[in-house]
Image: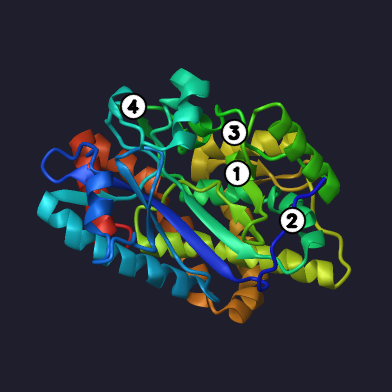
Amino acid sequence: MGLDFARSERSSVGIEWELQLLDADSGDLRQNAETVLDRLRGSDGTAHPHVHPELLVNTVEVVSGVRGTVREATDDLERAITDLRAVTEPLRIELAGAGSHPFARPAFQKVTNRERYARLIDRTRWWGRQMLLYGIHVHVGVEQRSKVLPIMRALLTRFAHLQSLAASSPFWDRQDTGYASNRAMMFQQLPTAGVPYQFDTWPELAGYVEDMTRTGVIEDFSEVRWDIRPSPRFGTIEVRVCDAATNVQELRATSALTHCLVEHYSAMLDAGQELPTAPRWFVMENKWRSARYGMDAILIRDGEGEEEPVSDTVAGMLVELEPVAHRLGCLEDLAAVRQILDEGASYQRQLRVAAGHGLDAVTDSLVAEMRAGTPL
């Protein structure tokens, strides 16, 4: 059972950010990713190295290179966004980030013309066509394969806190869903998405992949779409639980917290310390509570079932992780998490805008935050 894990530099970091293409006049989604990507091609016809297509043609994904710090990675993303705007602005397309669009109709969205996406939609049908969703993916390098699964299990004790901080999808098809992250609930309907299995050994994971491939569930490991997964091709742990950020400041904040958590658990393993774990039923409950209540969630903080408000646990994490952030060069970005604790997450701002001005104003606010680079 082979599942090779590439060599990578410890705690290197890469970030992927899925962005919405919005009509500058109506605020609705524009189905123009193919045009945008074509106009971004170099004079020799090569694709832009930091802007990629995604499942739907209303979406582009900006990706960083492999970097040493979160700030270096997000600088890559901002340069890619500058290149994007040179193409989108003449087309009267705005860029926005959020886990969902407040009023776009899922049934009206077109799928990118790629075989893997066609297979996904053919297999999942109605649920697959509901994937009008946007996220961020943070890759953190792990230098030893033996560390990957223990760190993943430890991250599952804190991934719901990341989901709460990043929650930005309260609306769905013109409805207030009552969830801080409706994206979390929708995305897990895909057959290999959602909370990962907690394997004890690498051969168990390899056996799972072999079984899923042999039975036609997946073509390759990239079709395993867990909230946290190993990325064998890159030699990383990929944290995918967060809704797309609505501004770069909050993107940096949640990415820095993710970066610090992986390095913290890696250092604990080096010191011979036991990493925290929680049974699957607690992990599943935390995912739901976080999606439903966001920053007001009371989450199960450990395997013993002790509960604590998400804001209290995160405040403690910021203190605990400060030395790690110093080592990783992201103290300022980690400190920005406290602003989310003090002033609220994106979903809360969106709900306030909708209550005062309606859903059309929500897209205006998303566009404004994207341009400002900070919460508004």
Q: What percent of the width, then of the height, locates residue 77?
A: 38, 65
Residue 352, compared with residue 173, is above or below; it is: below
Horizontal relation, residue 121 to residue 36: left or right: right
Q: Earlier in the sequence, mark 3 or mark 2?
A: 2
Q: Secondary structure at mark 1?
A: loop
- Label 1: how many Cα within 10 Å (few below 14, some 14–19, many 20+): many
Provide the residue designation for mark 4.
Answer: 106
Q: Earlier in the sequence, mark 4 or mark 3?
A: 4
Q: Secondary structure at mark 4?
A: helix
Tell me the distance, in whole angstroms, between the alpha carbons under discs 3 and 2: 33 Å
Horizontal relation, residue 142 to residue 318: left or right: right
Q: Indicate which label's residue lies in the foreground, 3 or 2.
A: 2
Provide the residue designation for mark 2.
Answer: 4
Provide the residue designation for mark 1.
Answer: 227
Q: Amino acid at mark 3?
A: Trp
- Res 68 quadrant in image: bottom right
Tell me the distance, in whole angstroms, between the alpha carbons under discs 4 and 3: 23 Å
Tell me the distance, in whole angstroms, between the alpha carbons under discs 4 and 2: 37 Å
Q: Does the residue at mark 4 contact the one at mark 1 (Cβ under 8 Å)?
A: no
Give the label on residue 288, or none: 3
Quadrant of the drawing holding the N terminus: top right
